[in-house]
Image (cartoon, helix red, strand yellow):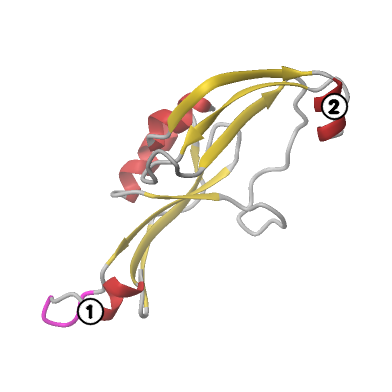
Amino acid sequence: MVDFYVRVFGCQPLDPERDLSGAWLEDGTGVRGAHIRGRHLRMPGHGDEGPTLEVFGYDEVLPQAPPAANRAGFAHLAFAVPDVAAALRAVVDAGGSAQGAVVSHEVPGAGVLTFTYAADPESNLIELQHWAPAVAPGGRDLPDAAAAR
């Protein structure tokens, strides 16, 4: 999964890689025999102090239900990308899957949203999105659309 998010979205892996186990981890997670390996990834576009995505895998993994955008709880990660169709191809080429069509829609006061949902190789939902200014009749950007993003 680390390789997927590095290759597809340009996340930056941070050292050290982790290989964790012990009673403290079992107590904190509530998982008996817990053993996890993973890494933190710096999210793109936020600089050296920006947020990270924690990608860890347990030795024992329980199955999950198929992904659904309207499932209760944590729904998805969203990435701003310059080209939604190209990002979707990259997700699929890296072992993920398409979950919906690429759609564009003007959101009043915000601009034109082009987006789709995809899933990473572990079936976690990812929204791929790109915002562009709304275009007024005559081909000029609407001033409030760019400011609202």
Q: Position of residue 46 (x, y in %)?
A: 39, 46
The C terminus lies in quadrant = bottom left
Residue found at the far left of this picture: 138
Where is residue 61 drawn, in percent x and y?
75, 26
Q: Residue 143: which disc?
A: 1
Find residue 129 and report its image quarter.
bottom left
Q: Mark 2 points at which residue?
A: 26
Q: Is residue 138 magenta?
A: yes
Image location of residue 115, percent across then percent down: 40, 57
Q: Residue at x 46, y 27 (%)?
A: 13
Does residue 65 belong to the magenta stretch? no
Task: Name the spot of residue 81 as percent of width and height, x first.
Answer: 34, 48
Tag on residue 31? Answer: none
In the image, taking residue 37 as reference, residue 11 lies left or right, namely left
**Main secondary structure type of the part rendered in magenta:** loop
Residue drawn 29% across and 49% down?
Answer: 83
The region drawn magenta spans 135-139
